[in-house]
Image (tube, rainbow, N blue to C red):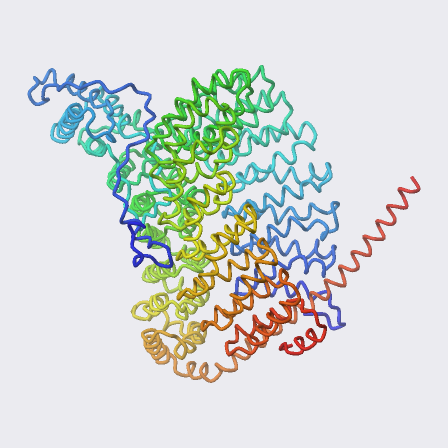
Amino acid sequence: MAGADGDDSLYPIAVLIDELRNEDVQLRLNSIKKLSTIALALGVERTRTELLPFLTDTIYDEDEVLLALAEQLGNFTMLVGGPEYVHCLLPPLESLATVEETVVRDKAVESLRKISQEHSPVDLEVHFEPLVKRLASGDWFTSRTSACGLFSVCYPRVSSTVKAEIRQHFRTLCSDDTPMVRRAAASKLGEFAKVLELDYVKSDIISLFTALASDEQDSVRLLAVEACVSIATLLPQEDLESLVMPTLRQAAEDKSWRVRYMVADKFSELQKAVGPEITKNDLVPAFQNLLKDCEAEVRAAAANKVKEFCENLPEENREQIIMTHILPCVKELVSDTNQHVKSALASVIMGLSTILGKDNTIEHLLPLFLAQLKDECPEVRLNIISNLDCVNEVIGIRQLSQSLLPAIVELAEDAKWRVRLAIIEYMPLLAGQLGVEFFDEKLNTLCMAWLIDHVYAIREAATCNLMKLVEKFGAEWAQNTIVPKVLGMANDPNYLHRMTTLFCINALSEACGQDITTKQMLPVVLKMSNDQVANVRFNVAKSLQKIGPVLDSNALQTEVKPVLEKLATDTDMDVKYFAQEAISGTRFTLASLHISTKSDLPF
Amino acid sequence: MSAISASEKVDGFTRKSMRKAQKQRKSQGSSQYRTQSAPVELSPLPQLKDAPSTEQQELFTQKLQQCCMLFDFLDSVMDLKSKEIKRATLNELVDYVSTNRGVLVESTYPEITNMICTNIFRTLPPSDNPDFDPEEDEPTLEASWPHVQLVYEFLLRFLENPDFQPSIAKRHIDQKFVLQLLELFDSEDPRERDFLKTILHRIYGKFLGLRAFIRKQINNIFLRFIYETEHFNGVAELLEILGSIINGFALPLKAEHKQFLMKVLIPLHTAKGLALFHAQLAYCVVQFLEKDPTLTEPVIRGLLKFWPRTCSQKEVMFLGEIEEILDVIEPTQFKKIQEPLFKQISKCVANPHFQVAERALYFWNNEYILSLIEENIDKVLPIMFGSLYRISKEHWNPTIVALVYNVLKTLMEMNCTLFDELTSSYKAERQREKKKEQERDELWKKLDELRLSNAALVQNNRREWQVYGQNNIKKG
């Protein structure tokens, strides 16, 4: 391996080669991930002359190894000697860019894009651009797909002759006979358009865009919709009508729902890109159609955009457009047959109230909110409840409270724990908006019931919820309404409920303050240190550590310390461990204590 | 609190099968973008068999046109009368083209294909169930099947009619037609895919000019499936067609076909839903190897490259395929691949999942494989020995241990001396491996030290350079 003269420098490459040939993929992967170590050990010159050729020649491996290699090489510029030599990295990356596996190829392209910035303009033309050309005219589709992502990074920095060549290559790939390549080209069309001169956008890009948007495969056509946004942004307003709109109109009525879905999904971006005039004349009717589409997927995507679309309408006739054109469609969607459509709508519909103002909200939107609050699908109700704040600002929540309550109660008891979890998370917000009396009267029982839910996540969320409520309503409220109930659970026969008491105390002590914590909570915790279940006992230790900072030093010294010391000699090893943790983590006043506890620790 | 009782829950979650059972079997309509206006009520035409022969042709055309009317099947009560008329007419048409001779005159071809295209070519609707699992879920069935089925039936009879002339039909059954037909293979409805399979097979057989195109498009569908969407319902059906296409390839195989094998069929093994089409896929692969045995080595190497690492179910499938390949392998080819192959098999027999281990050990029940192993026992035994010896002592599953003993016995009988040598050197071998492990660790440690010293050097250089740069700026 190493030379007889003790020269260590041959060592690394030998290790690498040895490891790269190992049968175990994990070892090969390890060595590739430490490639920078090897390169550093070798020094820049030998990295260039030995390591890189070796890597280029041996590229045939598991995709996982190749992925790691592709990623490493993107950060190799300094290791080969800086920008001056960065082109040495191109050969291995070029072969990685032709690999079948998409993730590897994408990573190689990403690295190539990264190092393209480190090339000088001359190197870009001498080394980088020829590579792009080779990829673009490769035999197998993989290299041509990779090429699509590289045009835009070199175009701005090369001479005009080379630019013309690049444009030609891109054109060719847009009409490639493999749909995979056309998809790659279509997905990079917008990006490429951005670096082109405006004249070429008009002469080249538009015709490519039109062709891709009427491709025989819907998977290509839908990518053209994405490009449409970028292209429309680049063109001056007066050209949009003739260059972009015919294609966009066609896409909005495409026979494939996937394309229409894409239009719906990109609607806000499209709206911004084409400006108010076209929006009024073209997009409003198109949007109406999407809201009434025969496929639920499309309707749901459009429903998601209702608020944003309305918000961005030109202000002078916004209200009129919404009332006459959009709202009738929205009303229909409230009773759609598909729950995804309804829940998409429910997640944005409340936002309309700020746009339409108080009177319209009460007259037109409120009935819709109420209908959705009674919807059979919990997700719809939940989405309405989660957006109550928008309505609250406009008309106040009281208008809704009568319908709100049954909806909340039903969600609180839903069979799916994720639904229960979601409604718990809105409790503090609801409590704030509904006020303390309403809360005490109607919702308090729910909040307490969650504490004994059979799913831990719900109990945990319920605990956290209590803390937020106390922060909102204050310590006195806590003392009167929730603390007694929480402490009562300490005597529950179920140890999980007893532990919930401890978790609640952990969460509440700070918000409740020193007085309540010391006088009411602490005695309960201390009493629980005799619990027969070890889990409860070590949670007592944890709780004592947690509430320690809230307690005064006297209570710490005279009450907490003896209990912890007792727990530290418990028969259960976990109880012991957490008691010791608590002792070392709590600020006891006497220095001697520190010393004694420290010496007790196993280390 | 809920319809599902607590006893049916596992850790607060409902079992998947329970949730599934609650759902009802649904059917869905096709996503026809309804540009066509509401259907006009159909009125029944006279029966073809009652018409005088001079008028039959005209009536046939009229009936074809009548069948171009599409109906909404999601609404089961709408247009009942017209739906029934269309159904009866389609039945009559099927009957007409399958029993009569001389009815396929040139002028009917455009009408026929138009009727077919209007009815079957449509954008497939989005799946009702976004996480549709073909292995577990019931497929969503095509709502308009009562009509669509008859149209497929008609198309099939049309293609199979003895008077059918591809030279005339090729103006209508062209590349675009085939492309749309292929897209329909993504249908969730297995009945539809089954028809499509037979139809595409007929088209492939009758239209020589479309063959290369069909192969290429299938290629593209598979590549998209593998590398882009991982979703396509008709992979098994397409592979079934390919199986018989490959069977008919002329020798020597064209480069295009070999490329298809290596760059499409082998990577198809990586798909998540392999179980759905593995039988058909393995059949295709074996077909290739029977045509050209020299492909054995690259194929097995390809399979080894994509060998499943975490999915035991897939691993069992791979082992099954390897056995199918070994069944037809030539002894010379076996020699070329035995080393890497048995390294993998040796890992499989030691797999903690007993089904994997068991499947691999079953190889020793195969007479032909046994004869190949025996012929190459000096190569195979040293590779297999370590794993077998170890699991004979360690595997948790008694069936596996019993199987391993049998295998060890068989191997011992093949070459007793070698077996004894390996047994006695087993311990030393393990120790050597451990030592190698330690050496590797040390190598890396040394390398790290080297890197640190070099990094320091580079930093120093950089700092000097920066100082130099700053000085320059100051001077400037």
Against A416, is A327 above or below?
above
**Residue B140 in which image quadrant:** top left
Residue at the (44%, 38%) spot, across then down = A383
Residue B132 image position (x, y, % from top left): 35, 45
Q: Quadrant of the C terminus of chain B?
A: top right
Residue at the (26%, 29%) spot, across then down = B166
Q: Is residue A178 left or right of residue B291?
A: right
Residue A120 image position (x, y, % from top left): 73, 39
Q: Looking at the image, which is closer to me, A285 or B93?
A: A285
Q: Is residue A117 left or right of residue B316?
A: right
Is residue A564 something that shows in the picture? yes
Q: Looking at the image, which is closer to me, B163 or A563?
A: A563
Q: Looking at the image, which is closer to me, A126 or A482?
A: A482
- For the image, the number of numbered tags is 0
Residue B282 image position (x, y, % from top left): 34, 54
Is residue A175 something that shows in the picture? no
Against B357, is B240 above or below?
above
Residue A328 image position (x, y, % from top left): 39, 22
**Residue A408 in which image quadrant:** top left
Against A413, is A232 above or below?
above
